[in-house]
């Protein structure tokens, strides 16, 4: 299956969450809806449906383009730069 962008193309092995929690929300005592794992550095953060949207903030601030869903049963990657999805 061809990738939708060069960032997704560059992912050779999917990084999975070390813990199923948003590392940034845990520090401030906040809650989250869904979790995403950054494919550049491996940090797990909360999705855009969560109040703090840590994953997309991280992607923009650190220029880490690709995150994977950290939800069990979901197997997809997302590129924040190109707004592209890839199932794996
Ligand atoms: Zn991309
Ligand atoms: Zn969070
Ligand atoms: Zn990262």
Image: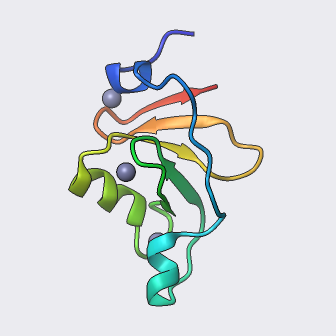
Residue 62 drawn at (x, y percent): 25, 53
Q: Residue furthest bottom?
A: 29
Position of 46 compared to 80: left or right? right
The quadrant of the picture occupied by the N terminus is top right
Q: In the image, is residue 69 above or below residue 22?
A: above
Residue at (31% x, 51% y) in the render: 59
* Vertical comparison of 72 with 6: above or below: below
Give the image quarter of residue 32: bottom right
Residue 42 rendering spot, x and y as whole percentages = 48, 50
Q: Locate the C terminus and report the quarter of the image it occupies.
A: top right
The image's colour scheme reads rainbow
Q: Which residue is located at x 40 percent, y 21 percent?
A: 10
Q: Is residue 41 left or right of residue 70?
A: left
Q: Work out which residue is located at the far right of the displayed protein and give it.
A: 73
Kindly identify the residue that appears in the image at 22 percent across and 57 percent down. 61
Task: Give how far across and how far down residue 80 sits, in percent.
Answer: 34, 42
- 24 lies above or below 10: below
Q: Is residue 15 above or below residue 57?
A: above
Q: Position of residue 47 (x, y in %)?
A: 49, 60
Nearer to the camera, 12 or 52 = 12
How many numbered markers are drawn?
Answer: 0
């Amino acid at each position: 299956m061809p990738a939708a962008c060069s960032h997704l193309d560059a992912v050779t092995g999917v990084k999975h969450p070390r813990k199923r929690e948003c590392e940034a929300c845990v520090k401030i005592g906040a809650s989250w809806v869904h979790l995403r794992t950054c494919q550049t550095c491996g940090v797990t953060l909360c999705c855009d449906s969560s109040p703090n949207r840590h994953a997309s903030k991280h992607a923009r601030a650190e220029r880490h383009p690709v995150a994977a869903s950290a939800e069990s049963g979901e197997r997809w990657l997302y590129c924040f730069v190109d707004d592209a999805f890839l199932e794996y």
